[in-house]
Image: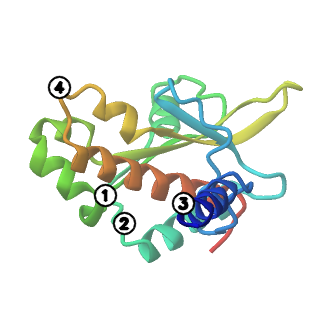
């Protein structure tokens, strides 16, 4: 009797684990992440302007408890040196101490990767048309540069990365 009950419970657990896709809309879509690359990149949707993305990043990041301590308009600085930046080239820095503190407490050397950066840039797409993209240097890959990272740091880096990817995905759609 107990074997039958145990087998039924195990079957339900296994089938529940194998039952398909994540339905939590707050969870970032991680299907297009190259897990060996430090770069996570997403194309901005057609109809979403540069200004829309910038406004979205500002609004959403504040709502997610991120501060934006610095921005660097690399394209503007290239143009000042008479170099054609070939489109938008900007870097936005983000810090969320709620997510990053655990990594930094366990591994102060991780500060070389802080704050996290999201780049907004234009480049030609597959049809050679200039398109806007968002790119992220993934914290989970950065953490691999640290010798023997703690489990707490690994978990925090994943949470930080997930939050930044969620921010990027929403900004790429012009969400607020």
Query: Counting residues from the N terminus, which is met first, the one under dot 2 or under dot 1?
Result: 2
Query: Counting residues from the N terminus, which is met first, the one under dot 4 or under dot 2?
Result: 2
Horizontal and vertical percent position of residue 148? 18, 29
| Image quadrant occupied by the C terminus | bottom right
Query: Counting residues from the N terminus, which is met first, the one under dot 2 or under dot 3?
Result: 2
* SS type, badge 1: loop
Q: How is the image coloured?
A: rainbow
Q: CA distance from mark 4 to mark 1?
A: 23 Å
Q: Is residue 2 left or right of residue 155?
A: right
Image quadrant assignment for residue 62:
bottom left
* SS type, badge 2: loop
User: Among all residues in the image, which is located at the extreme right?
Assistant: 127
Query: Counting residues from the N terminus, which is met first, the one under dot 3 or under dot 1?
Result: 1
Q: Mark 4 highlights which residue?
A: 147
Question: 145 or 23, which is in the foreground?
Answer: 23
Q: CA distance from mark 3 to mark 4?
A: 29 Å
Are circles 2 and 3 on residues that touch, CB within 8 Å? yes
Are circles 3 and 1 on residues that touch, CB within 8 Å? no
Are circles 4 and 2 on residues that touch, CB within 8 Å? no
Few, some or many residues within 10 Å of mark 1 (<14, 14–19, 20+): many
Q: Mark 3 highlights which residue?
A: 167
Question: 100 or 19, which is in the foreground?
Answer: 19
Q: Mark 1 highlights which residue?
A: 95
């Amino acid at each position: 009797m107990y074997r039958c009950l145990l087998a039924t419970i195990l079957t339900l657990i296994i089938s529940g684990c194998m039952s398909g896709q994540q339905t939590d809309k707050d969870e970032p879509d991680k299907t297009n992440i190259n897990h060996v690359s430090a770069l996570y990149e997403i194309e901005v949707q057609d109809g979403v302007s540069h200004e829309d993305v910038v406004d979205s990043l500002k609004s959403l990041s504040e709502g997610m408890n991120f501060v934006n301590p610095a921005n660097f308009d690399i394209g503007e600085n290239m143009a000042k040196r008479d170099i054609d930046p070939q489109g938008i080239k900007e870097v936005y820095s983000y810090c969320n101490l709620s997510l990053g503190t655990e990594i930094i407490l366990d591994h102060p050397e991780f500060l070389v990767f802080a704050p996290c950066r999201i780049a907004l840039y234009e480049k030609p797409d597959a049809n050679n048309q200039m398109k806007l993209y968002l790119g992220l240097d993934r914290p989970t890959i950065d953490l691999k540069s640290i010798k023997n990272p703690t489990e707490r740091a690994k978990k925090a880096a994943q949470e930080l990365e997930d939050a930044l990817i969620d921010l990027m995905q929403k900004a790429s759609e012009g969400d607020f």
